[in-house]
Image: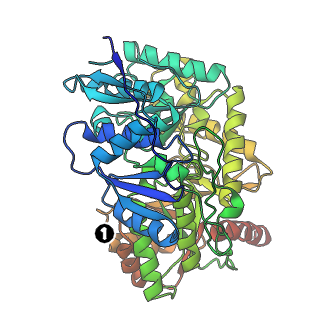
Amino acid sequence: MVAVILGFVVLCPTDAAPNKTVEVIDLRGLSGTQGLTLSIAAGLLSRDPDSPLVFPKMLPNDDLWLASVIKDYPDVRFTNTSADSLLQQAVQSGAVKSTIIFSEAEPWTFVTLLSLCALHKALPLPNTPALSHSSTEVVVIQRPDLVAQGFLADLVAQRSLFTFWLPDMCTAGSPSNALYQIITDKAHSEGHMLTLMGYFPSQEVVASCSRLHTEVSLVSDFSSSLSFWSRLPPLSALGLLSTWTTGQPSGVSQHRMSQPQLPPQPPVQDVRYNPDHTYVAVIVSDGDNMQMAFNWDREHMDQRVAACAADPSYLGCPPLSWTISNHLADYAPYALQWYYRQAASTGQDSFLLGPSGAGFLHPSLIDASDPLVQVFINQTLDALKLLGASAWVQWDEYDNHARRSGTASLEQARGTQRLHQPLQEEAMQAYVSRFKGTGVAVFSPITPYLPPWVDDGIPTFTEWVRWFASKPTKEVADFLNGEGLKGELGFMYMIIDIGMDRLRELMPLLEAHVELVGYRELVQLAHQKREYERNHV
C-alpha cells in the first residue's frame, strides 16, 4: 500500500507558551481514531522543550494522578484544552509538518501509520496507509485497537519509535516470525538488549519467539501520557521542591530519575531468627509491568497509605514489599518518586525489581556465551543501585537446553520430573551464580525452585503462596499457620487483583509464631538461619 503524505500549510508560530504550563485534554470516550490523532499531536508538541506539557487523560486513575501533580507543582498553570485547540497549536507551533491519509477500515495498518507519523511529524487523517525506520534499542508492539485509542501513540510520536503489530510473530515459519527475526537480529548485531514496549498477549515473553532470546518485554500497553510523564521533572529529594528547569537543549526534553532524587527506602528493621517462628515476606506482583504503576498499583498504594495512617500497628500496617519497574526512571520519574514517597510515609513498605531484574525475559534461555548476558547483568545491577534495592523476582525458562539442542520436543523433555528437573535447575543456577559477590538476593516464584543458597553467597527464596483474589483468606492463613513451616523462610506473591483489605483481613487470622517481614528483613534472616543451622548440627 502507498501512503499519501500531504504538506501542511504552517502558519506563523504564536508566542511560545510559558514553560511552566500543562494543558490537559480528555481522550476518554472518543470515537474512531480521534484518540490516536490527539495523542500523536500531544507527542509531537512534547518534542519542543519550550512548549507546554500536554497531559492526555486516558484512564480512570489519570484524574488521581493529575490531582497529585497539581498539588505538588503549585507554581505550574494547568488548563483544560479542546481537541480543536490542541490540533491548532500543534500546527501553528510547527510541531506538525504534514498529514498522512489512511483507512480506518484497515486497523492492522495503524501501527505502521503511527511510525510514519512519528518519522514525518505528521497527523493521521482517515482515508490509506504504509513502513518506517527501525530502532535497535526500543520498539513498540501494540494492538491496533489500543493504537486507535491513542495508547503509546504520544510516546511513539515524541521519540520516533518504530511500531508494529505482527499477530503471528511467534509462529515458527510464518512471514511475521521472519520479519520479527530481522528486527531482533539487527538489534543483537549492534549489541543492544532490544526493549519491546506494549504487549503481545499470546506470548508475553517476546524473547521466547526470537532466535537469540535477548529481547526485554516492557509491558506498557495501557500506559497513558508517557510523553507527558517523561518530560515532567521529578521533585527535589530535599523539601520536595520542583526541579523544573528552562532552557533545555533542542530535541526531546526528558528527565531521567537519578538515585539521589528518590527518597530512601525505609530502614531495614532489626530482626532475630527464631527456629520456632515462620517468616513470610508479602510481595506485590507485576510491578515490572509498567502500566500497573498507573492503574492497579496506584489504587492499592492509596489503600495502603490510608490503612497505615488509620492503624500504624503491626496488625494494621504489616511490612509489605512491592515489585516496581526501573524503567519508570526513564518514562515517568515523578510516578516512581511518588511511590517512594508513599512508602516513606508508612515506614513499612519496600521495593525490589520484578521479573527478571532489569526487564522481563528468561535469562537462562540466552546462550551463556552470549555477551548480552553480561550486559543484562550489568543493567540489573545498575537498576538495583538506582532503586536502592537488593533483590529481584526471578522468572525464568527452564527448558532451554532441550529446546536449543533440538534433540527433543518441549513435551518430550518434560517426560518425567526426575529427568527434567536437573535441566531446569542447572540453567537457572548458572545464570544466578554470575551475580556472586554483588550482595543480591533472588525470589523465585516458579518451580522447581533454586536451592536456598547459590554459590554459598546468594540467598534465594521460595514462593509459598500465589495469592489470587479467588483464594480465600482463611485458606492462606491456614497454610501459613502450619507446623511444618516453623523455622522456614518464604514469600507470598500477592497478585494484583487483590486489594489491601485482604491483607488486613489476613493479619488477625495468623498465629503468633507467623511473622510478616519485608523482603530485606527476610534476607537478613536467611543469613541468621544459616548461622544457626551451622551451630546446631
* Colouring used for the render: rainbow
Which residue appears at 63% of the width and 36% of the height? Answer: 427
Front residue of 468/232: it is 232
The relative height of residue 460 versus residue 33 in the rendered view (above or below) is: below
Q: Quadrant of residue 117?
A: top left
Q: Report the residue at 57% width, 71% height from top.
A: 341
- Above or below: residue 209 compared with residue 364: above
Quadrant of the rendered image containing residue 532: bottom right
Point out the image quarter for the N terminus. Answer: top left
Q: Position of residue 20 (x, y in %)?
A: 53, 59
Residue on which the image places disc 1: 472
Going by the numbered disc 1, the residue's amino acid type is Pro
> Residue 84 in the image: x percent, y percent?
28, 44
Q: Is residue 127 left or right of residue 537?
A: left
Q: Nearer the viewer, residue 137 or 227?
A: 227
Decide if residue 1 is in sight here: yes
Image location of residue 156, percent across then percent down? 45, 35
Mark 1 crowd level (few <14, some 14–19, many ≥20, 10 Å Cα): few
Residue drawn where x is 33% and y is 23% of the image: 100
Q: Quadrant of the C terminus?
A: bottom right
Q: Is residue 91 above or below residue 313?
A: above
* Vertical arrangement, residue 152 with respect to residue 225, above or below: above
Left or right of residue 159, residue 500 in this image: left
Q: 215 or 253: which is nearer to us?
A: 253
* Residue 166 seen: no
Q: How many marks?
A: 1
Across and down, in percent, residue 118 comes to 45, 30
